[in-house]
Image: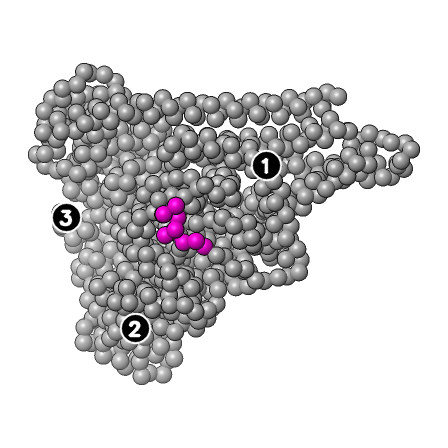
């Protein structure tokens, strides 16, 4: 593939270039192979998943045995949306649940708005003390609303707020959610299924997150699914489909799920307390918790399951601005690297079985070296071509395979979505998303890798900040 | 050069597959949308007819049977008693039963499950459900069919059903408890007999125990005796048995609960504390007060709850501990009292 230019180079330059090219190609092929593997497993997982009953049947069958759940919703400076979010959470269809809203030291009127809207009064609560968190300033409740408890604490970050929530929760299961996300009314009944079907084994389960930008939202419910007009939001819809309907579904089927999204995950409280809850000082606390659970259960040689369920849907708002999206992506990258570094002893360690090989292999391939190699490839290939070391037909052929494979994976995910879930109401939406799947390869994909490299750089420099995540709010989405 | 050509061919193949996939999706959508309009028209005719219990005035067709079956499933969830019987008669004449029986052999497990649940309501098709759905290769379908049959009081013999579903061996779902509750309604003594079947796993016995404990259909004395004996064994099921004893509150179970308060496993202690509160076991008050200083939060929390349930004596014990020497117990007692006051 590399043409030897005798007059320009010595043999060592060619040999080095060849070696680097081989590393890039082999990594690329491994990634492609892993994606194909994931697609196959995702298809198997979707076609063999437990039959999904309709809402009414679901309630009839599962409500009797559904274990009580505490919904932990950390809130920081969310005075504009917090009341609507709590109303939407209180309206969920689930037999026994409690909403624990954790005001994580908001500097705006978040707490005052909730107190006013729900007529809350200060109460006392006897809580567990096993997890560390910043000081709790008080509890607020209303006897007429026994399902709501507001925990007011000093600011400590999301992980800290969730730990406070876990200490306050009195149910065997807790569901960690983002206060500004929207859960479908039967999402809890759907995500709790593995805990009912396999109560002795299941310790955690995650559900699908979807992008709400463009959807019509009324009274905290997604009433009509529409695609957004913003290109960045459209691309993220494809990304979320690939991440949830391909990657997580497949990894869940293989029992090597390494992330349950912080926006919506259900956990058995006991095991989470045993591993010390969410870790402070990391931006990937959701991924880290799952890795800690794997490690803990493997160390104790206790059988367990961590599942992913495709149906329960949590809607979230995604950034439509490149600057905000870039910050989010570099933070995600940093989180993955921090988790990998913290638990590197699990990687390819036979003691941790498939999670050590497949789970960590996937993190290494996709999150750790993936962006480096891809960006390196983008730089190397034109350089080799300019130096006359790479023939044009090879350059074009490799680019063609890279891009067509990207399109193929996206379309395959869309097919899975359409055959098994069918959430997009109009045929036109499918056509638009297919177009996005093609176009995203030219420009967005490279930009995304640049953000991930920024995350790498922040990780190397041990930067800890979260960066500001500005949201438009669902109110404006509804009107769009 | 062969590798280069292969790369281009691979790209073309990937493009072609993606293109065909999308074209297929769009075509299926368009066909589906046309079908759904016809389906909607049929629904408008069939819905009032089924609600009235009339024979529907539509040309018999596969689509009409399909719509009738779906409507029946939807409506049957919301109507009861004689209204449901009327609905099922009309649905039968519209071909809903026939359609559901066909779906019982569908390739898609979801369809088979829904069909089995629906068909269990039609007395004339219960034999099909028993024969086909209870032998389904997918466990969820088998369990769903069993639950539906049991709810209608048409399940086969309890022992056979338990073994067919593999409850306690291959089937560990908590829905087994719901199943047992429905089975108790139609044949309590057959469920009771499960307790004395040595071949059955503990999980079956526990599900039977919980179902029997909740029903008033059996004499509780022998059941409690059995439960108390079972609670003596060092088994994982012990906390659940003790909790069930607490719900029953039968005096014959008190000793087992009191023993549980001394257990080494905190899960058993927590269950026993809860049971002592539910069964209003005043004799347990001193031990409950001690357990306010337990090293496990769940035991301390449940002990506080139990003492509150035990009325004046329990409250008195809480006040005593709140001014006592043990700092852990003191905090637990104070916090429990403060919570009760502010509630």
The x, y position of residue B110, in whole percent, is 33, 31
Q: Distance between the Cα atoms at labels 2 and 1?
A: 54 Å
The chain ID associated with circle 2 is: A
Q: Distance between the Cα atoms at labels 2 and 3?
A: 47 Å
Q: Are marks 2 and 1 on the same chain?
A: yes
Q: Decide which of B318, B98 is in the foreground and name it.
A: B98
Instruction: Tell me if label 1 and label 3 are in contact, CB under 8 Å.
Output: no
Number of the label disc, if any, that sits on residue A122: 2
The quadrant the N terminus of chain A occupies is top right
- Which region is colored magenta? A471-480
Instruction: Tell me if label 2 and label 3 are in contact, CB under 8 Å.
Output: no
The quadrant the C terminus of chain A occupies is top left
Which element type, helix, strand or loop, lies under badge 1? loop
Mark in the foreground, 2 or 3: 2
Q: Decide which of B58, B290 is in the foreground and name it.
A: B58
Q: Decide which of B241, B60 is in the foreground and name it.
A: B60
Residue occupying image coordinates x 31% and y 53% = A88
Q: In this rendering, does residue A302 appear at all?
A: no
**Left or right of A279: which side holds B82?**
left
Residue occupying image coordinates x 21% and y 69% = B309
Principal SS element in the magenta part?
A: helix
Residue occupying image coordinates x 21% and y 23% = B42
On whether residue A382 falls in the magenta region, the answer is no
Hey, which quadrant is residue A27 in on the image? top right
Number of the label disc, if any, that sits on residue A441: 1
Q: 10 Å neighbourhood of mark 1: few (<14), some, or many (≥20)?
A: some
2 or 1: tag closer to the N-terminus: 2
């Amino acid at each position: 593939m590399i043409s030897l230019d005798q007059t320009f180079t010595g043999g060592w330059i060619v040999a080095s270039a060849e070696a680097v090219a081989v590393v890039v190609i082999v990594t690329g092929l491994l990634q492609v192979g892993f994606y194909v593997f994931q697609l196959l497993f995702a298809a198997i997982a979707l076609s063999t998943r437990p039959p999904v009953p309709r809402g009414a049947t679901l309630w009839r069958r599962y409500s009797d045995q559904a274990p009580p759940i505490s919904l932990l919703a950390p809130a920081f400076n969310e005075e504009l949306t917090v009341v609507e979010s709590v109303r939407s959470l209180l309206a969920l269809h689930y037999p026994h649940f409690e909403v624990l809203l954790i005001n994580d030291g908001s500097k705006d009127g978040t707490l005052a708005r909730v107190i006013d809207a729900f007529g809350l009064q200060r109460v006392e609560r006897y809580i567990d003390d096993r997890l560390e968190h910043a000081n709790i300033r008080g509890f607020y409740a209303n006897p007429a609303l026994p399902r709501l408890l507001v925990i007011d604490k000093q600011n400590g970050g999301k992980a800290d707020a969730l730990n406070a929530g876990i200490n306050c929760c009195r149910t065997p299961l807790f569901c960690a959610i983002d206060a500004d996300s929207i859960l479908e009314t039967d999402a809890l009944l759907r995500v709790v299924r593995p805990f009912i079907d396999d109560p002795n084994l299941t310790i955690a389960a995650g559900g699908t997150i979807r992008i709400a930008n463009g959807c019509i939202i009324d009274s905290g419910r997604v009433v009509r699914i529409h695609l957004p007009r913003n290109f960045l939001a459209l691309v993220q819809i494809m990304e979320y489909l690939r991440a949830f309907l391909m990657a997580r579904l497949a990894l869940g089927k293989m029992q090597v799920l390494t992330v349950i999204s912080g926006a919506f995950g259900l956990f058995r409280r006991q095991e989470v307390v045993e591993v010390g809850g969410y870790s402070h000082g990391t931006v990937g606390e959701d991924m880290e918790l799952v890795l800690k659970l794997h490690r803990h259960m493997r160390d104790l040689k206790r059988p367990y399951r961590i599942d992913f369920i495709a149906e329960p849907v949590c809607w979230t708002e995604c950034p439509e601005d490149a600057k905000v999206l870039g910050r989010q992506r570099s933070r995600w990258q940093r989180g993955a690297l921090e988790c990998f570094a913290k638990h590197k002893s699990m990687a390819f360690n036979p003691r941790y079985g498939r999670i050590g090989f497949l789970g960590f292999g996937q993190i290494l391939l996709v999150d750790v070296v993936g962006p480096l190699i891809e960006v390196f490839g983008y730089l190397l290939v034109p350089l080799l071509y300019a130096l006359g070391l790479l023939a044009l037909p090879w350059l074009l052929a490799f680019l063609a395979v890279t891009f067509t494979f990207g399109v193929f994976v996206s379309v395959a995910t869309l097919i899975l979505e359409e055959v098994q879930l069918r959430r997009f109401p109009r045929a036109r939406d499918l056509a638009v998303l297919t177009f996005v799947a093609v176009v995203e390869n030219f420009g967005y994909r490279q930009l995304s890798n640049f953000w991930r490299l920024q995350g790498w750089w922040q990780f190397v420099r041990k930067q800890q900040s979260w960066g500001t995540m500005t949201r438009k709010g669902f109110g404006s989405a509804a009107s769009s | 050069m062969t590798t280069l050509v292969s790369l281009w061919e691979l790209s073309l193949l990937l493009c072609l597959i993606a293109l065909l996939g999308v074209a297929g999706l769009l075509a299926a959508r368009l066909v589906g949308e046309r079908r759904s309009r016809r389906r909607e028209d049929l629904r408008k005719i069939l819905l009032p007819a089924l609600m009235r219990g009339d024979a529907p005035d539509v040309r018999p067709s596969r689509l009409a049977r399909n719509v009738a079956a779906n409507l029946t499933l939807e409506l049957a969830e919301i109507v009861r008693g004689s209204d449901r019987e009327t609905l099922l008669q009309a649905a039968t004449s519209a071909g809903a039963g026939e359609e559901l029986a066909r779906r019982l052999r569908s390739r898609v497990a979801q369809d088979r499950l829904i069909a089995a649940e629906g068909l269990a309501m039609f007395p004339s098709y219960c034999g099909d459900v028993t024969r086909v759905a209870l032998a389904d290769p997918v466990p969820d379908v088998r369990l769903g069919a069993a639950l539906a049959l049991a709810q209608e009081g048409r399940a086969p013999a309890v022992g056979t059903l338990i073994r067919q579903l593999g409850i306690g061996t291959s089937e560990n779902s908590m829905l087994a408890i719901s199943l047992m509750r429905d089975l108790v309604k139609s044949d309590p003594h057959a469920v009771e007999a499960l307790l004395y079947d040595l071949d059955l796993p503990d999980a079956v016995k526990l599900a039977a125990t919980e179902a029997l404990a909740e029903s008033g259909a059996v004499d509780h004395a022998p059941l409690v005796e059995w439960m108390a004996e079972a609670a003596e064994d060092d088994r994982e099921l012990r906390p659940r048995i003790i909790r069930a004893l607490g719900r029953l509150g039968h005096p014959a179970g008190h000793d087992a609960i009191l023993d549980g308060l001394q257990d080494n496993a905190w899960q058993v202690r927590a269950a026993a504390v809860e049971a002592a509160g539910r069964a209003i076991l005043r004799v347990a008050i001193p031990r409950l007060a001690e357990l306010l200083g337990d090293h496990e939060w769940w035991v301390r929390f449940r002990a506080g709850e139990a003492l509150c349930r035990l009325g004046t004596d329990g409250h008195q014990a809480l006040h005593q501990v709140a001014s006592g020497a043990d700092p852990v117990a003191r905090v637990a007692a104070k916090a429990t009292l403060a919570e009760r006051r502010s509630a």
